Amino acid sequence: MSTQEKLTGRERCFCYHYAHGCDAEHAAARAGLSLQQAIELIGKEKVTAEVHRLWELEQERLQSLARLGLGRLAAVDNRDAVKLALHPEELGDEELERLDLYGVSSIKTLKGGGVEIGLYDRLRALEALGAGEKKVPDEARSFYSALISAGKGAQEPREDEDGV
C-alpha cells in the first residue's frame, strides 16, 4: 500500500498545499482542517513522507519548466521586438497581439520619442542550459529540512511558560 493510499482526501489536500509552500495554517484551511489538526498531521510519518514526495515532484516540474523557458529564450526570434522598436506606430492592435515578445525583458518609452526594448541575454540562457544543474538548490533543501523539523517538533510535548 502506498503512502498516498493511507491518507484521507483532506490529508492529501493538506500535504499538497504544504508541499507547495503554504504554511500549516493556510494548508489546513485549504484542506478544510483546523490548525490543531494540521499540527497533529505534521507529526505523522506518513504525512511527512507524502509532503516530501510531492515536494520532490514539484521541484522536478519547476526544473523542467525552467529548462523549457531557457531553451525558448536561447532560440527566440527577436524580429518582432525589432519591428516594435522601429515601427511601433505602424502596428495595429491585432498585429501587436500576434507579436512574439518572449525574449523581451523590458520596454521603455523615451522622452524624445521612440521605444527602447531590452532583451534577455541568449548567451546566459545557453550557459544556464549547459550547466544543466539537476540538483535541488540549497535554499530549497533547507525549506524541506524545516518541514521535517517542524514535524518532529509537533510530536514532542511542549511545556507552557510555567514549566507545567
Image: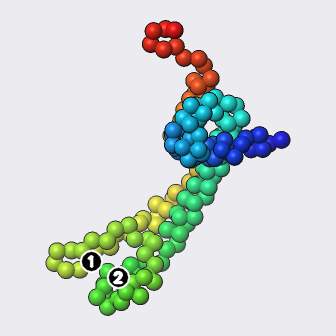
From the viewer's perspective, tell me whether residue 142 is left or right of residue 121: right
- Give the mark nearer the N terminus: 1 vs 2: 2
* Residue 74 rendering spot, x and y as whole percentages: 51, 68
Nearer to us in this view, 25 or 33: 33
Measure how far apart labels 1 and 2 are at the Cα level: 8 Å
Q: Residues within 10 Å of mark 2 (few under 14, many from 20)?
A: many
Query: Which residue corresponds to the image point at 32% horizontal and 80% vertical from the top-left?
Result: 85
- Furthest toward the right, the residue is 1
Residue annotated with mark 2? 84
Residue 39 sits above or below residue 79 on the image: above
Residue 28 sits above or below residue 44 on the image: below
Q: Residues within 10 Å of mark 1 (few under 14, many from 20)?
A: some
Residue 41 sits above or below residue 118 on the image: above
Nearer to us in this view, 157 or 62: 157
Secondary structure state at the residue bearing disc 1? strand
Res 23 visible: yes
Amino acid found under the numbered disc labelled 2: Leu
Residue annotated with mark 1? 115
Amino acid found under the numbered disc labelled 1: Val
Query: Which residue corresponds to the image point at 56% horizontal and 41% vertical from the top-left?
Result: 28
Within the image, what quadrant is residue 146 found in?
Answer: top right
From the viewer's perspective, tell me whether residue 120 is left or right of residue 1: left
Res 135 visible: no
Query: Which residue corresponds to the image point at 67% horizontal and 36% vertical from the top-left?
Result: 47
Residues under numbered marks 1 and 2 in contact, where contact means CB atoms less than 8 Å apart: yes
Query: Which residue corresponds to the image point at 53% horizontal and 69% vertical from the top-left?
Result: 72
* Residue 153 rendering spot, x and y as whole percentages: 57, 24
Question: Could you tell me which quadrant the N terminus lies in?
Answer: top right
Secondary structure state at the residue bearing disc 2? helix
Residue 145 sits above or below residue 89 on the image: above
